[in-house]
DNA sequence: AAGACGAAAGTGGTTGA
DNA sequence: TCAACAACTTTCGTCTT
């Protein structure tokens, strides 16, 4: 039932995400999937299944475990509901039997409670959103599970079904440490962010989900690839974030703001500068927030001197380059004159 | 002209009485 | 339920490159 124990680890392989080029991939052993940490794309899903072997050739037949296919929440009835066929069935029934099966069918329909009807509707919505945001099937499944729990606890009544679906999926993303913003979900179901956020918090509280505040580090791969920066920038930014966290400058601040500022600072230090506007757009925050975080980092980590040195070096290099260029030009001119 | 900077006013969410 | 509050956004004028 629980997904807490999902064995999941980050791998650095020769593989790259074809979507964004990110090299940090999550390996979900249970699902046999490799998922991009940045964009959530399923890079590979035909891996060896590490799950329970359903046959057992051991002599001790007590160990025999044959459990059938895993339940899938995304299929609204988990493939378990019963349908009593109607008269178009191959086996035409007569007289007593016919009325008996008619009765059965009616009862079956009555047993199909509002929960099932609700799930039928909402799971297609869930699939739509998750494919729109390119979520992996593992996340989708987790979202479906959470939503099913929400329905069973009667949390949906009085709320927009889409919002609860989006909230569940968002919660699933948080659990998988996938950086998807509330804005993206709000966009997908054309609602306001605050509505999605409120529903998410409600669902998370009622289901007693312990979801850690998202870590700025989770956003890094996404930002780095969106800004076309390299691994060096990423590790430097990660370094900055960790140092900032140690100085307790991160509490209360939005994690993507911290990640954005770290990325911006890293580009400054490495001399591959991106503008505040660029970074802000990618992170979905304003320049002002980046500035504030950046200033704090600069102060707390004592980066002023370092940044100054970088600036000086870049200036020096550009002067050098210019000189070289001028020299080449001069040489060219001289040679031209010789020809005349 | 573009980018960085900082001040000031406004917004939405949290907290605590 | 209301006010106080911190974080963030919007807007805008100024400075720097």
Image: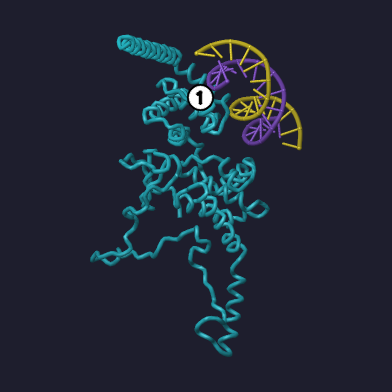
Chain colours: A cyan, B purple, C yellow
Q: Position of residue A101 (x, y in %)?
A: 57, 82
Drawn side of residue A1 relative to residue A321, left or right: right
Instruction: Name the residue at the front extreme.
Output: A340
Q: Position of residue A264 (x, y in %)?
A: 47, 25
The numbered mark 1 sits on a residue in which chain? A
Residue under the image location 48 percent in, 65 percent down: A79
Nearer-the-camera pick, A145 or A31: A31
- Number of labels in the image equals 1
Nearer-the-camera pick, A331 or A132: A331
Residue under the image location 34 percent in, 41 percent down: A11
Instruction: Tell me the SS state at disc 1.
Output: loop
- Which corner quadrant holds the N terminus of chain A? bottom left
Classify A246 as above or below A87.
above
Drawn side of residue A173 relative to residue B16, left or right: left
Is residue A7 something one can see in this rendering?
A: no
Residue under the image location 55 percent in, 34 percent down: A284
Classify A204 as above or below B11.
below
Drawn side of residue A247 relative to residue C5, left or right: left
Nearer-the-camera pick, A102 or C2: A102
Nearer-the-camera pick, A311 or A177: A311
Q: Which residue position is annotated with label 1? A: A275
- Which corner quadrant holds the C terminus of chain A? top left
Judge the density around disc 1: few (<14), some (14-19), many (≥20) Cα neighbours within 10 Å. Answer: few
């Amino acid at each position: 039932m629980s997904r807490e124990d999902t064995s999941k680890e980050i791998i650095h392989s020769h593989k790259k995400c074809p979507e964004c080029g990110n090299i940090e991939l999550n390996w979900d052993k249970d699902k046999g999937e490799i998922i991009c940490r940045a964009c959530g794309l399923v890079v590979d899903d035909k891996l060896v299944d590490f799950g329970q072997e359903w046959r057992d050739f051991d002599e001790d037949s007590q160990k025999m475990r044959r459990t059938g296919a895993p339940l899938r929440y995304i299929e609204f009835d988990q493939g378990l509901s019963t349908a009593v066929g109607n008269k178009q069935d191959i086996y035409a029934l007569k007289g007593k039997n016919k009325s008996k099966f008619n009765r059965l069918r009616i009862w079956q329909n009555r047993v199909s409670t509002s929960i099932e009807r609700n799930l039928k509707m909402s799971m297609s919505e869930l699939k739509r959103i998750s494919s729109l945001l390119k979520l992996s099937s593992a996340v989708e499944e987790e979202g479906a599970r959470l939503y099913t729990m929400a329905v069973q606890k009667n949390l949906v009544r009085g709320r927009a079904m889409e919002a609860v679906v989006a909230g569940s999926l968002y919660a699933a993303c948080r659990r998988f440490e996938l950086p998807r913003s509330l804005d993206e979900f709000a966009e997908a179901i054309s609602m306001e962010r605050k509505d999605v956020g409120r529903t998410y918090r409600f669902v998370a509280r009622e289901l007693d989900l312990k979801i850690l505040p998202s870590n700025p580090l989770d956003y890094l791969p996404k930002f780095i690839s969106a800004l076309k920066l390299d691994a060096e920038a990423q590790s430097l930014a990660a370094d900055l974030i960790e140092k900032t966290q140690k100085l307790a400058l991160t509490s209360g601040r939005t994690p993507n703001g911290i990640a954005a500022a770290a990325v911006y600072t890293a580009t400054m230090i490495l001399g591959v500068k991106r503008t505040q506007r660029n970074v802000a757009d990618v992170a979905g925050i304003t320049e002002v927030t980046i500035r504030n975080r950046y200033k704090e980092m600069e102060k707390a980590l004592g980066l002023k001197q370092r940044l100054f040195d970088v600036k000086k070096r870049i200036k020096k290099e550009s002067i050098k380059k210019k000189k070289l260029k001028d020299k080449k030009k001069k040489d060219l001119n001289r040679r031209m004159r010789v020809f005349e």
